[in-house]
Image (spheres, helix red, strand yellow):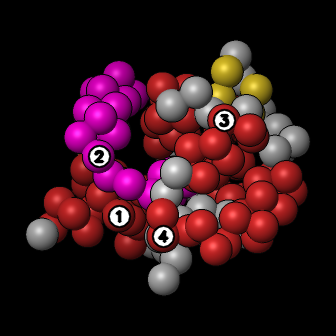
Amino acid sequence: MKATLFCVALATILAIGQCDPDFRQIMQQCMASTQVTEADLKDFMASGMQGSAKENLKCYTKCLMEKQGHLVNGQFNAQALLDTLKNVPQIQDKMDEITSGVNACKDMKGTNDCDTAFKITMCLKEHKAMPGHH
């Protein structure tokens, strides 16, 4: 049960509605490559995803976005994200709202690729342009 909750919380951060085994594998790979621990992620969630995230956490979001094809060479691929989200049954009725949120966030730039990925993710969260908000 705990893993599922954790998964849903993370899914909310990362604009992914389903926590399938492939996504879990991607999460594990990204956690390993950026040295982010579950404790780091839980702390971040506990703070309401506010405040400044550590650089490795920002790079973790970049890693997840890259592996899903939502970030390519530091460029956010809004269409790829929308294509992924179109396949999530529980948000079909919110696609208009989500599309406008994605469009509002897609041109955000950070100080580096990790920062850019993180800024876009937080912007999507602000616009509720991701599944997981019930």
Residue located at (81% from left, 45% from top): 106
Q: Residue at label 3?
A: 80
Q: Earlier in the sequence, mark 1 or mark 3?
A: 1
Residue located at (60% from left, 67% from top): 92
Q: Name the kind of residue labelled 4 in the image.
A: Gln
Task: Tell me the tag on residue 118.
Answer: none
Question: CA separation, marks 3 and 4?
Answer: 18 Å
Q: Earlier in the sequence, mark 3 or mark 4?
A: 3
Question: CA separation, marks 1 and 2?
Answer: 11 Å
Q: Position of residue 45 (x, y in %)?
A: 41, 66
Q: For the residue carrying disc 1, how many other residues have a C-alpha within 10 Å: few (<14), some (14-19), or many (20+)?
A: some
Q: Nearer the viewer, residue 23 or 50?
A: 23
Q: Residue at label 4?
A: 90
Single out the mark in the foreground, 1 or 2: 2
Q: Residue at label 1?
A: 8
Q: Name the kind of residue labelled 3 in the image.
A: Ala
Q: Earlier in the sequence, mark 4 or mark 1?
A: 1
Question: CA separation, marks 1 and 3?
Answer: 21 Å
Single out the mark in the foreground, 4 or 1: 4
Q: Position of residue 100 (x, y in %)?
A: 83, 62
Q: Nearer the viewer, residue 32 or 96?
A: 96
Disc 4 on helix, strand or loop?
A: helix
Q: Name the kind of residue labelled 1 in the image.
A: Val
Residue located at (47% from left, 35% from top): 64
28 shown above or below 72: below
Q: Residue at label 2?
A: 20
Where residue 33 sits, quadrant-wise, is: top left
Q: For the residue carrying disc 3, how many other residues have a C-alpha within 10 Å: few (<14), some (14-19), or many (20+)?
A: some
